[in-house]
Image (cartoon, helix red, strand yellow):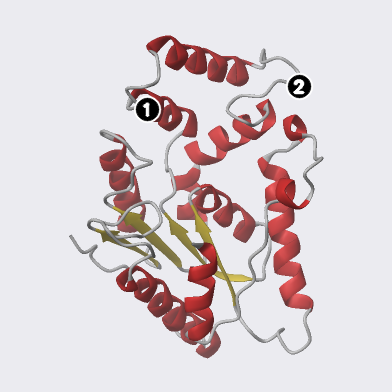
Amino acid sequence: MYRQWAERLSEAGFLVLRYDKRFLTYPDLDIPSFDQEAEITDALAAVAFLRSLPGLAPLRIFIIGHSEGGTLGPLVAERTSAVAGVAVINSVQFSVDELLVAQLQARPDVPRSTVEDVRRLFTDIRGGSFPKGGVLLGAGANYWAQWMTYSRSAPETLSRLSMPVLLVQCLNDETLPGDTLARNVAILRAVVSTKKNAQLRELRNHDHLGILPGERHSSSEFIRIVVDWLSRESRSAQSGAPASAASAPPR
């Protein structure tokens, strides 16, 4: 799906860099030691790579972060002066451990005992008593501890950003079960209400990847929203014009 996004953006005139996560490139990586700081380091290296390419120095760089990437994208933007804007797509805006427990609770095939075990292990991670070298749901303690911290503070991070921000929340996002979707939307609306250069787009019937029911690819509406925002903000950044004001979210 990310390839499709990249191709559509490229067709619209943007140069797109996408890359595999480190553990895909290096399958022998020690998973318990891999964390989100490593992912931020790789993203910063990607920005530096773009900035180093001949002829690209005058161009503006934007980050598009989806899901976990939506948590990390604003942090990357804070750590470099080279980013002109950030798009955050379907990213949790509260502590991710709460979301994962809610996801497990929403699955009828997951025993209640398993849910309680996962809840307890997240408590151990927060308290620093998780076994050294242990793995929970495919990742180590540092990874989860950092994601819990970063997701819990995500609204504050977004509010701090000086550059324009596009927030997209699909309203059929299957990764946000029960009342977690409404909770996420409320947080995003609160961010936009206090941040002039942020806008929120809420997409009915779209799932976690911006796909409509019965379709196989992200919708043209979803792609258009991202392309239009990038086009507008890149023009504003190049001309020195003020960033666009937040618009009322469509419903």
Q: Is residue 194 visible?
A: no
Mark sitting earlier along the chain (1/2): 1
Is 181 situated above or below 235? above
Q: Name the residue: 55% across, 52% down.
A: 69
Q: Considering the numbered disc 2 on the image, is that residue within a helix, a strand or a loop?
A: loop
Q: Amino acid at mark 1?
A: Ala
Residue 243 placement (x, y as % from top left) = 43, 76
Crowding near the residue tagged with mark 2, few <14, some 14–19, many ≥20 C-alpha atoms within 10 Å: few
Residue 6 placement (x, y as % from top left) = 54, 72
Q: Is residue 61 left or right of residue 116?
A: right
The residue to which callout 1 is attached is 102
Q: Nearer the viewer, residue 160 or 9?
A: 9
Q: Considering the numbered disc 1 on the image, is that residue within a helix, a strand or a loop?
A: helix
Crowding near the residue tagged with mark 1, few <14, some 14–19, many ≥20 C-alpha atoms within 10 Å: some
What is the spatial separation of the Cα atoms under label 1 and label 2, in whole angstroms? Answer: 26 Å
The residue to which callout 2 is attached is 133
Is 110 situated above or below 205? above
Q: Name the residue: 71% across, 60% down.
A: 44
Q: Is residue 5 left or right of residue 219?
A: right
Q: Is residue 215 left or right of residue 119?
A: left
Q: Amino acid at mark 2?
A: Gly
Q: Is residue 198 visible?
A: yes
Viewport quadrant of the C terminus: bottom left
Q: Nearer the viewer, residue 11 or 58?
A: 11
Q: Which mark is residue 141?
A: none
Q: Name the residue: 50% across, 53% down.
A: 70
Residue 143 placement (x, y as % from top left) = 65, 34
Q: Name the residue: 66% across, 42% down.
A: 36
Is 243 situated above or below 36? below
